[in-house]
């Protein structure tokens, strides 16, 4: 799920790399809003797309649940996906929706632009850069974590950390995007391997077909 054009910059490389080759992994659905450029990217691929209207703040629980009902069963008559990736998704998922996805054996992962135990919520990249300007830090990073009712506090799946080398916030944003692409690639690669069944299980090593006419040897 994506709700920002910034997320499309991170995501489009994953779409191309995973759909233009014979892999064990496929992007099946996109849920986004009208402000996202990613819709233009997926038009040439067999990806089911749901475009939601932009929504500001919710005035009641009923409004939030009504908004979530529009994509609660986004897979329709297809099989539920194994994983949902929240990429630039600005809307906090309700506990009801998280439970719903978990009950369908869907793992929900969120890309968050700050390191564990630092900033939570919105504008975390800006918070990090301001901290850098104030001399409080020289490093930044992003994480992908499991989505839970506690905002940005779910179990961390993976992180990436780097030294800040930027004079402006725009430069810093590009630096964050560059590293998030690597983080996302690593997490997707690990998800693929963990979902595959080895073709050969031996006493010393296992062999798994990972696509691309390649085999992965687990030692």
Image (spheres, rainbow, N blue to C red):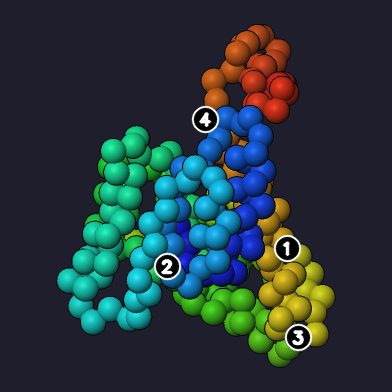
Quarter holding residue 206: top right
Q: Position of residue 115 (x, y in %)?
A: 61, 66
Crowding around mark 2 (Cα neighbors within 10 Å: few <14, some 14 to 19, many 20+) is many
User: Disc 2 to disc 1, how far (Cα)?
Assistant: 23 Å
Which residue in the protein does label 4 denote? 195
User: Disc 2 to disc 4, how far (Cα)?
Assistant: 30 Å
Q: Are marks 4 and 3 in contact (CB under 8 Å)?
A: no
Using the image, determine if residue 203 lies above or below residue 213. Answer: above
Q: Is residue 51 visible?
A: yes
Where disc 3 sits, the SS reads: loop
- Residue at 57% in and 30% down: 24
Where disc 2 sits, the SS reads: strand
Where disc 1 sits, the SS reads: helix
Mark 2 vs mark 3: in front: 2
Q: Position of residue 49 (x, y in %)?
A: 42, 53
Q: Is residue 105 left or right of residue 195?
A: left
Q: Which mark is residue 33?
A: 2
- Residue at 43% in and 39% down: 82
Q: Earlier in the sequence, mark 4 or mark 3?
A: 3
Question: The C terminus lies in which quarter of the figure?
Answer: top right
Q: Earlier in the sequence, mark 2 or mark 1?
A: 2
Which residue in the protein does label 1 denote? 178
């Amino acid at each position: 799920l994506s709700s920002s054009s910034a997320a499309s910059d991170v995501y489009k490389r994953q779409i191309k790399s995973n759909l233009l080759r014979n892999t064990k992994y496929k992007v099946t659905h996109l849920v986004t809003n009208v402000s996202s450029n990613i819709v233009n990217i997926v038009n040439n691929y067999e990806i089911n797309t749901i475009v939601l209207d932009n929504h500001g703040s919710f005035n009641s629980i009923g409004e939030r649940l009504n908004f979530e009902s529009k994509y609660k069963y986004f897979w329709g008559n297809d099989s539920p996906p194994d994983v949902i990736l929240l990429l630039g998704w600005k809307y906090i998922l309700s506990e009801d929706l998280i439970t719903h996805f978990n009950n369908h054996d869907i793992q929900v992962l969120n890309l968050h632009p700050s390191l564990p135990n630092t900033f939570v919520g919105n504008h975390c990249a800006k918070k990090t850069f301001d901290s850098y300007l104030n001399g409080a830090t020289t490093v930044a990073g992003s994480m992908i974590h499991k989505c839970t009712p506690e905002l940005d506090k779910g179990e961390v799946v993976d992180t990436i950390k780097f030294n800040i080398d930027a004079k402006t916030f725009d430069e810093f944003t590009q630096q964050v995007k560059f590293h998030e692409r690597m983080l996302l690639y690593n997490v997707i690669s690990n998800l693929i391997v963990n979902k595959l069944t080895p073709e050969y299980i031996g006493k010393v090593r296992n062999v798994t077909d990972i696509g691309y006419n390649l085999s992965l040897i687990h030692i």
